[in-house]
Structures are given as structure tokens and as C-alpha cells.
Amino acid sequence: MIESITIANVATYGSTPEALNELSQFNFFFGSNGTGKTTVSRVIANESKFPTCKITWKGGTRLQPMVYNQDFVERNFNQSSELKGVFTLGEKHVDTLTKITAAKAELDSLTTKIENLTQGLQGADGTGGKKGELATLEAGLKDKCWAQKQKHDAKFQGAFEGYRGSSEKFKGNVLKELASNAAALVTLAELEKKAESIFGTTPTTEQAVSAVDTSPLLAHETDPILKKKVIGKEDVDIAAMIKKLKNSDWVREGRPFFNANEGMCPFCQQSTTQAFAQSLNEYFDETFVADSKAIDNHATNYSTDAARLQQQLAAIIATPSKFLDIEKLKTEKELLDSKITINNQRLAGKKKEASQVVELESLNNVVAAIKALLDSANTLVADHNKMVANLSKERSTLTAQVWKYVLEELKTDLATYKTARDSLDKAVTAMTGQIEKAKEDKRKKTTEIRELEKQTTSIQPTIDEINALLSSFGFHSFKLAKAANGSSYKLVRADGSDAKATLSEGEKNFVTFLYFYHLLKGSESDNGMTTDRVVVFDDPVSSLDSDILFIVGSLIKGLFDEVRARTGHIKQLFVLTHNVYFHKEVTFNPNRRRGMAINDESFWVVRKSELVSKVEKHTSNPIKTSYDLLWAEVRRSDRSNLTIQNTLRRILENYFKILGGIDSDKICDMFDGKEKLICRSLFSWVNDGSHFAHDDLYVSIDSSQVENYLKVFRAIFDKSDHLSHYKMMMGDAFEESASA
């Protein structure tokens, strides 16, 4: 059985869902053509085609939907040359029928069991039952856990980090801690005191300051070459003069000029002997050359090692550690830089005058001061990082202790929760298992019934019953006959010729209705006759005269009796129509008091306002007479601009025809100008005599004219001295005019 239907974004229905809730066994829908009734029937017929719509079935048990609408007529009459045979159970197979009846009773019992278990498991709307109790239990614990978070959050934010923004996550961690927390239970006062220091801003580990190696640079200060006087060979004849003049370096510098001047003295321009040139070469021997090279290498290496140390210190200063006394380091580096500059100058002098004794400015003190600054910083970094490591451990310990305290405060609630949760989990597991077992038993029982049905089915009884109905209702010119394939029907004349193509619209609709009516008690195949069904009739009396309309209504009401007596397989019925008389006929029930709906029925009106379909539920039958229905449309504040003009015309036609002797021209003469034209427009059909309140003809008017039409409509009753009738029919919607 269908409990509710939600329709949105399909046909004339808008994006705001129309909810048809609390549906009953018998559901009556009234609405004009084009308002959206057929859409309701199509959604029931095949919900999967309408993803924006939803049907809720009782207990989740989906029944077979059988829908009579224009789609059914088109599919079974217009598109096929033959009607599919309706298989019914043959009455001659008494034993088989008895087995089917017993099996169907067992199947119904299983269905009821599944529905009851499903309702007990998840409630009628999917949010109740044991699962609903479980959800309520979880929500209750979540609230209690969150209350603890709110209570202690100000001082224990650090412990609750990661769970402070979600009550669900907080509850989840409470349960996690319950299963694994082995921390010691500490008093609240002690926890709060620890939290003040441990849950402050979390420091991070720091990188150590880069080390510098000064030993290569310091080693240059003690190189023997610095104190060695590098001069030529002393046993050469020219050596005495050079030594006397103490101009060894001067002579060494002049040698390249002497060699370039081809043996002539570069100073006096006098020719020299070969012996003189040989004496110069012997004076500056290999030892002199090696020592000179050692001086050059020492100067280069000192400059390189000094520059490397300066670059290392510059990098440290550029990205200083917060633990380094950067100003002191800068001062020491400036001193270092100045000493290095002096030493480079002295080494340059040594290179130029190799015979000089050079002593470098010692870097020991400044280098020691720099290394002391760096070592001190790294000691502080190490201490800091050790503290960070210990703090992380302390925070972890304190966090566990805070959660332990929370668990202690929730001790009673958690114990109650666990007991209830275990009980509900067992119940849910047991009920789920019972539902699955019942569904499996139901599948087996359904298969058993289908096999039994195949043993006792025939399409001939349906032929006989439909032909008897056609004859009794005066349709003698055609009848049903079995087609050549033996499993379908054809419509034939008395002489056996095909009658399908020559039937009138009314004949076609009536025979299709009878076919659908018998299909409700059978099946299009040789099994499935006893399947539980939801049946929909959408405007089944279209194109039928009043006599047949009455017959169709009687047949449908007969189905109501079967449903109430539980003698058939129809579990729920929907009747949708635009015909006032058919609606009144099919909804008549002498047990209904004061028009109020009884327990097994619901009433609905489908309307279209501003081109959007709306479905309204009524506590009583909303359709009393066609005349009342027309006035109800006028009383609405959200009346349809599309149909209001015709509605006003129909009221005037019905009312003034009943009175008789009313001259519409005299009434219109009481108006002037535009209002007179509107009056004539509203009376234009009165003299025609061919339209009645249940006709469906619409003429659109501009929305800005609606108020003028309503004003003239009221004035017609006023000027014809029938304002009291207008007032009575408008009821609470009546308003005194400004001129009254």
C-alpha cells in the first residue's frame, strides 16, 4: 500500500514538491482537465521513470501498480491489433484452487509479518522503530558528551583539539577513549594547573647553527715561510755586492727586464758579459724559486680559507637563529674581517719582497670568540629541542588524563548507553534476520503460487464475462472473440469481421475499461493472478454517456466492497476525474456523516495556479455540486486567471437559467462603457444554451482584467437585486463595497 507520494519537476509540477501524505485505502482526486491528474497516475504506474518523484510503500513492500489512463488505452487498444488475453483461474480445478487459496493466505501472512517487522525496525516513515530508538540513544549521548566539551572547553582546548567543531566527532572520541584510555585519573584542579603551561602555544624544534672550521686558516699563521728571508745563493761572485747593497729583491724584480733587453743592463744600457748573466742565474737558484712559490701558495691559500670562513659567517648572520647573539657575532666578524685584510696585505708584501720577515695578525682570539658564540647558541638549541620533545610527551599524557576525567564524569551515562545500545543492536540484528528470512520464504511461496496458477488458467472466462456485460448494456454490434493464437482477444462484428477500427470513441473506451476491469482479477500471463495490487482509475468515463458512466461507477464501487471485505487482491484504490457527476457517484457513501471523510478514504483537489499544479487534501468531500465548485473557484484568493472568465460565465448561466425570465440585455444596459462590454461578454453564453458547468472550455484573458471581471460579476447580482445570493455563495470571502 502506498503511504505517500512526492511529485516535483515533472509536467506542470514545479520545483517545490507536492506532498500527498497519509494516503488511505480509497483516494479520490478531482481536478479539471490539464491540471496534473494524469501525472499522478503515471508516477504510480512507473516510479522509475520519474527520478524527481518518490513513492513511499508501507513497510517497504512494493505492490503491483495497475493503472487505467490514456496511456493504458493507447498501449492496449490503439497500438495493437489484438488485446492480450486475460488469464483467470478456472473454477473446475477445485483442489488446485484450494491450494492456491491456502498458499495465498500464507503469502499474505508473510507480507504482514515483513511489514510489521519493518515498521518495528524503522517505523512507518523510516525514522522510527528500533533504528529510531538507536538514533535517539546516539543523539542523547552526543548531547551529554557535548555538554562536557562546553563545560571544560575554555581550559582544555588543547586536549579537545580536532573534536571541538563537531559534537558527533566529540562523541565518537569519547567512545574511542572508553575502549582504550588507560591514563591515571587526576583531579580537575591538577589538570587545570597543568593545562595552563602545557596547552599554551606549542613551540617547534629549531635547527642547530652551522659549525665553522677555522683550523686551516689558523694553521697559516705558523707557516715557516713567513719568517724565512728568501735570498739568492751566497757563493756566487755577484752575491757579495747584492748582500752589501741589500737589494736582493730589487735585483730579482729587475731580472725579467734584463732578460728582455738581450743582455744589456736595463738601468745603464751598458752591455754585460756572459759571466754576469750566469752569475745572476746561479744566484737565484732552485731553492730560491721553490721558496718564492711557497710564498705565493701561502698567500693564495690564506685568502681562499679566509674568504670561505667569511662566507660561512655571512650566511649564519643572514639567517640567524633566535638563540644566537647576532650583534656580538657581527662585531666579532668585523674584527675578523679587518685582521684578515691586514694579513692579506702583509702576505702581498711578502710576495713582493721575499727577503722580508712577515708576522700575521693572530686570529686566535677573535675565532675563539666566534666559536664560543656559535657553541653557546647550539647549546641553547639543543636544550630547546629537548624541551619541545618533552613537552610533546607531556601534552600527550595530559590529553589522555583530561579525556579520562571526562569519561569519569560520563561514567553513569556511558554505562546506561552501553546497556541500551547492546540491547538495541541485538534487536536490530534479530529483526533484520527475521525480515530477510520472511522475504526468502515469501519468494518461495510466490514461486509456488505461480506454478499452481499455471495448472488452472484460461482466457475464455474473461471473453464470456465481457461479452455478457456488453450485451446487457446494449452493445450488440460487436463482441470479443479468441484470436487465432489462443492467448489474445479480437473485436469482431456479428458476421465475424474485424470491428476494432470502426468503434466509436465511447465504445472503444468502454470495452477498454471492461478489459482493464477484468485484468484486475486476472493476469496477462498464465500466472500472477493472485498478486497484491494498487489500482488507479484516471478519468475512466471520458466520452461515455450518462448511462455507461453510472455502470462504470457501479463496477468501481463493487471493487470498493471487495477491498473492504478483503476478498480480492486489490489493496488500495485511486480514482481521479474531472467529471463532477462521476465523482459524486463513485464517492457516495451513506456511512459518511456530515460529509467528513471516513477512516479508509481521502479526498484531494488538483488545481493549476499560474501554470503550476498544486494538490490539496480535504478533510471532507470537496465536491458537493458543480455550482458549488464554480463558486469555490471564485472565492479563492489564488484563483486561476486562465479559467476565471469561463467560471464566471458558467455561474451566471446556471443561476439565471434556474430563475428564468431574466433579461440579460436589461442587466447589461445598467452598465456603461467598458463595464458594459464585460457584462455582455459574461452573458454571451447564456443565450447560447449549449454549455454547462461541467464542460471544459477555457479562454485566456489578460491578468490585469481579472479584477474588472470580478467587479462587474458582483455588480450583475447587485443591479439585478440578487446580491444576497452573491453574499451567501461568497461566504467568508464576501467584502462590503466601499460605496455601501
Image (cartoon, rainbow, N blue to C red):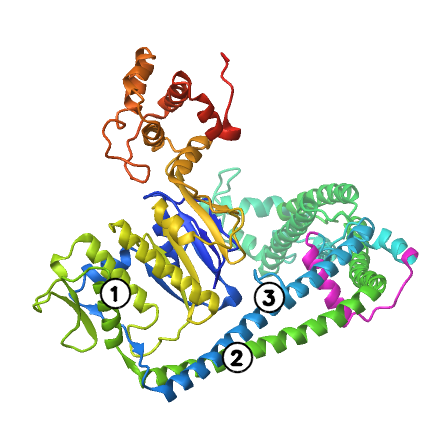
Q: Residue furthest bottom?
A: 95
What crowding class fits label 1: few (fewer than 14 Cα within 10 Å), some (14-19), or many (20 or more)?
some
* Observer-nearest of 356 and 709: 709
Could you tell which of marks 3 and 2 lies nearer the N-terminus? 3
In this view, the mark in front (1 or 3): 1
- Decide whether the magenta segment is chiefly helix, strand or loop: helix
* Observer-nearest of 704 and 363: 704
Residue assigned mark 1: 469
Query: Type of residue at label 2?
Result: Ala
Residue 90 placed where, x, y %?
31, 81
Is residue 49 in sight in this rendering? no
* Image position of 33 (left or right of 218): left
Query: Type of residue at label 1?
Result: Leu
Residue assigned mark 3: 122
Labelled disc at residue 438 = 2
Report how far apart the C-alphas of labels 1 and 3 lie in the structure.
47 Å
The quadrant holding residue 161 is: bottom right
